[in-house]
Amino acid sequence: MSTQTFTLPDVGEGLTEAEIVSWKVAPGDTVAVNDVICEIETAKSLVELPSPHAGVVGEVLVEEGKTIDVGTPIITFVTESASSDAAPASASDPERAKRDEGLAAERGGAVLVGYGTGGGATSRRRKPAERPVRSSVGVIAKPPIRKLARDLGVDLASVSATGADGEVTRDDVMKHASQASVFRNIETPEWGDVREEVLPAPAAAPVGLARGLNPVPERAQRDEGRTEAIPVKGVRKASANAMVQSAYSAPHVTVWKEIDATRTMDLVKRLKASPDFADIKVSPLLIMARAVIWALRRTPMVNAAWVDTADGAEIAVRHYVNLGIAAATPRGLIVPNIKDAQTLGMKDLARALNRLTLTAREGKTAPADQQGGTFTITNIGVFGMDAGTPIINPGEAGIVAMGTIAQKPWVVDGEVRPRWVTTVAGSFDHRVIDGDGMSRFIADVAAILEEPALLVD
């Protein structure tokens, strides 16, 4: 018998710390190689951490909710012998490591360097809890699918199953869900008894901002129990730092245009009724995404980026589109992106948007899916907002905000008629793009939303 100590590994995204969110094992539990032992949250995403050893859990060294550095011991295992433990997949079987990485990419999970994926190894024995469960009404579905259905408010008994042996799949739940978007509030909290609370500032105020102002009365700070301090960490900390960096490094300018989107709404209605889109969620965001991709091709500078170099600076113009979609998730704001979105047709782009929203809702967006974006869409319309002035995602030069689509009086051929109207606002980095360039881009987006037939070459 020997004791093995497992330290927090580098999860392959260049980060130096992570928070232990929840432990999946306890002292005395028997584990196999690649069994999930805990969930950790990095600045990018929630990641399942697999065990590198087979044996019995000895001691849990870090409590839940604590943020630690990479290399910190987190758990010990009692094994038969040091040599009896299975070697990490990447070291003992390169082909198996490739399979693990491919499986992780398919599931939207992160690959931990040298340790394989959480639950991804093909040789791992499936735990009883992961097997499909049949309820009293005869529905077959795995526990994660049942949780997804609960989160979306879907009655599994009413879902048409397409999986093997009548099992309900993730796509089945997505198809049935009345709303499976992460771009909306899940619930509205009640007003609490505490009138004010203080959130720790993520960064020092830049020069030029008012200092010394206290937004909370002194008495409220003195009275214990009247305020609550929420630590800024994980996704929230990374997002806050990125927004501060962007807001105070790139000169932001915003333009906007009100648009008659009636024909877009008609097209969405037809696509929803089309058999070709029977298994795909369709929304105005799909048409907006296609419009943005089309407009970026006509004004490439909007898809560029300002790059500081040793000799000064340069502008990198990307001739591909990694389309980011700002997602308000329970863990904070993230911006996953669809790689090479310019190569996707309408159906494939719709499927990509479905996968993106689902994995974001589940908190399973892989770090790689949040890197390398070239342009971002934020859909504030689902919050009932008409327009806004969005902050540019770092590493990009532009972002558009799509407002709510609502019926309003609109003049058509000299007559006032009810039309579906929305507002599209675009913020841009004035170092990279001039006003006329962004104006042309927004005009192109507006043209597509007003007449989607322009997308047909």
Image: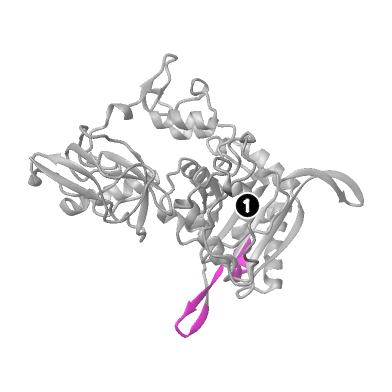
| Closer to the camera in the image, 436 or 55 | 55
| Closer to the camera in the image, 228 or 373 | 228
145 displayed left or right of 438? left
Q: Amino acid at mark 1?
A: Glu
**In this view, 229 is above or below 249:** above
Residue 371 picture location, percent across and down: 45, 59
Residue under label 1: 218
**In this view, 5 is above or below 273:** below
Q: How is the image coloured?
A: one colour
Residue 168 picture location, percent across and down: 43, 27
Residue 446 picture location, percent across and down: 72, 57
Residue found 66% across the figure and 39% down from its top: 270
Q: Can residue 425 be spotted in the picture?
A: yes
| Closer to the camera in the image, 127 or 352 | 127
| Closer to the camera in the image, 274 or 442 | 442
What quarter of the picture does the C terminus occupy? Answer: bottom right
Residue found 32% across the figure and 27% down from its top: 129
Residue 219 forms part of the magenta stretch: no
What quarter of the picture does the N terminus occupy? Answer: top left
Residue found 30% across the figure and 51% down from its top: 112
Residue 306 forms part of the magenta stretch: yes
User: What is the magenta range?
Assistant: 295-314
- Name, please, the residue furthest toward the bottom: 311
